[in-house]
Amino acid sequence: MEVMIRMNNIILHPGIILILSGIIAALVPEKIRKIIMILGPAGAITAMLALDYGTVLTVPFINGIELMLVNVDRLSYVFGMVFSMMSLIGSVYALHNKGSLETTASLCYAGSSIGVTLAGDWLTLIFFWELMAASSLFLVWANRSEKAVKAGFRYLLVHMFGGNCLLIGIIFKVNGGDMLISNVTAVHDAAFWLILLGIAINAAIPPFHSWLTDAYPEANVTGSVFLSSFTTKVAVYCLIRMFAGTSFLIWFGVAMALYGALFAIMENDVRRLLSYHIISQVGFMVAGVGIGTPLALDGATAHAFSHILYKSLLFMGAGAIITATGINKINQLGGLAKKMPFVCVAFTVGAFSISGVPLFNGFISKSITVSAACEAGYPLAELLLLVASVGTFLHVVMKMLYFIFFGEDKGIEVKPLPKNMYVAMSIGSVLCILYGVFPDLLYRFLPYDFEYHPFTWDHIMQYVQLLVTGVVPFIMYLEHMEPLSKISLDTDWFYRKPFAALVRVISSLCVTVQIGLGAFFKSIYDGVRRASKNPLVFIGEHGITEYEGIESSKIAASSAASAISGTSADVIADNAEAVFDGDFAGNDIDGKLAAEIKEEAEERAFDNNQLDSADVYDPDKEREPIGDIMSVVIFTFIAAAAFIAAVFM
């Protein structure tokens, strides 16, 4: 029985410590920023260690509502601890970065992930959830390439959709009087499905997974280490917390495990292949959530913990290869074992871990879920998860290790790596082996009561047989195993092609409406301006004849300027002067008014030329319609904010 312990200082919140560290890092010189990159995560780990089960922290909100920023139990403690550990490992790996953007984004990203994990109420969860999405976006954009910018916008749109689904589901919950986070499986109402959809997108459950394989490979090499560790595992935490025992998730998880392994077969990009295996490994966790027994839920928790360590190690190894060689394609690499022996060893540790080789941390966690499927009476799920394990070994251990490190030497020149990269990979490697050899270091913190012994003869022989099953076909078909430089079509095709075409059509309509409304409101503005100078115009009187004539000439000149789209400013100005001279030949204010008309005509011509070159939709141009989408999205957010205010204020 856990005893409630009141926490009085918000500064002791591990997530807040990381977020504040990220903000401070953006404001200080580089040398101090490097110190903060270590002290911030170290402080978060210390704060997590200081939290006891049952600790809560509440703060007043509005209308008498209290937000529960911290609610520590065994489940939140395990995830909060591994997130804090990963923030330190990732920060060490990124110490050589010069800019502050990635440091701020990564620390805020890690801090908001811990914020979701420790949240005790729905409103706190959605706040940190959206902060997590926003901060992770800048890790994609930090690469500062055209591909990264486009992938970042797609990442943003997908997560905004998922976040809005989650938000609406939470509004239903809160409006029904359920403020505290709990299991929502009792009633399959609208809130259930909306919350599940929002979380499923972050968990990369097919068909809502392609944002992951689209964005992660385009991020900076240090940013992708953080990305591989947090978003999907935060979603797994939420699934365990809210949807444990939802049986149809078993088959979604099995499909994920097979789907990711299958697409990894065809992949040539180092980080994209690893991204597909994120989907595959998260599938084991989702299947465990669906099974819902204490053994299965502990298996999902343990595998999330292990996955963060070995997947980040693999991404660190991949980032080291890309940094040293400038190459990210497997078939362009080879013979790096002699040139990068330390990276080879670290990558091997990560590869053995993800494949479930005994004495590595993947073995002590993945096997729990497989055993839980067997004990719960799902033999088909057990079989398919084992098949997925073979695929993982075949493509990460055999294909990547062989062709990158032991294949034909392509004569690649290797640049020296920053020392901090070696330190981070050392920490990750040690932890993968440590937990693999001493599983009780993890098991004793798992949230549900279970009894499991990974090092039984049956378990060990089962995985040895599976690994041999993966080695044999690889050796037999070695000459066909090298990946090809091809593009694999995935579900992102639907929003890259047909959805993009639809948006372009909508974009052209938006631009047309924009132009029409612009002319309409300009005519109103001109009428009001004239009326303010000569109120009698409303009753048809000609009160100030000379001024009215001058204004009419200015309007005529302006109309001429507006009508001649693409005409040079000088030609329009000449036309304007001609209009003026025709009406007021010999008038003593000709010079002053002509200059005024010419200036306005030049401004109009410039505006029209800019409109022609940038704003008018041209179907022959491959233009990214992101601006129009974002306008609609911003409006949606404003409407959502107004709706929330109406509900809670």
Image (tube, rainbow, N blue to C red):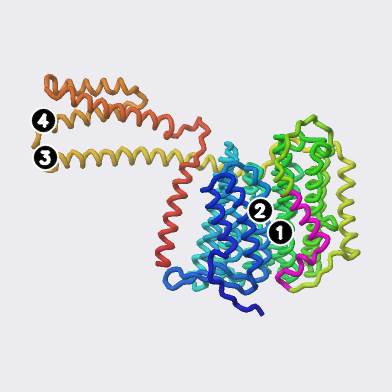
Circles 2 and 4, Cβ within 8 Å, touching? The answer is no
Q: Secondary structure at mark 2?
A: loop
Picture coordinates of residue 127, whole percent (x, y): 52, 60
Residue hosting label 3: 540
Residue hosting label 2: 206
Nearest the eye: 13 or 66: 13
Please check the rendered image and state whether residue 436 is part of the magenta-colored stretch, yes or no.
yes
Three-letter amino acid code of the residue under disc 3: Gly
Residue hosting label 1: 253
Nearest the eye: 383 or 159: 159
Q: Secondary structure at mark 1?
A: helix
Q: CA distance from mark 2 to mark 3?
A: 68 Å
Q: Is residue 648 above or below residue 30?
A: below
Q: Which residues are magenta?
A: 424-448
Q: CA distance from mark 3 to mark 4?
A: 16 Å
Q: Secondary structure at mark 3?
A: loop
Residue, x 86% and y 44% (percent of image)? Answer: 474
Residue hosting label 4: 546
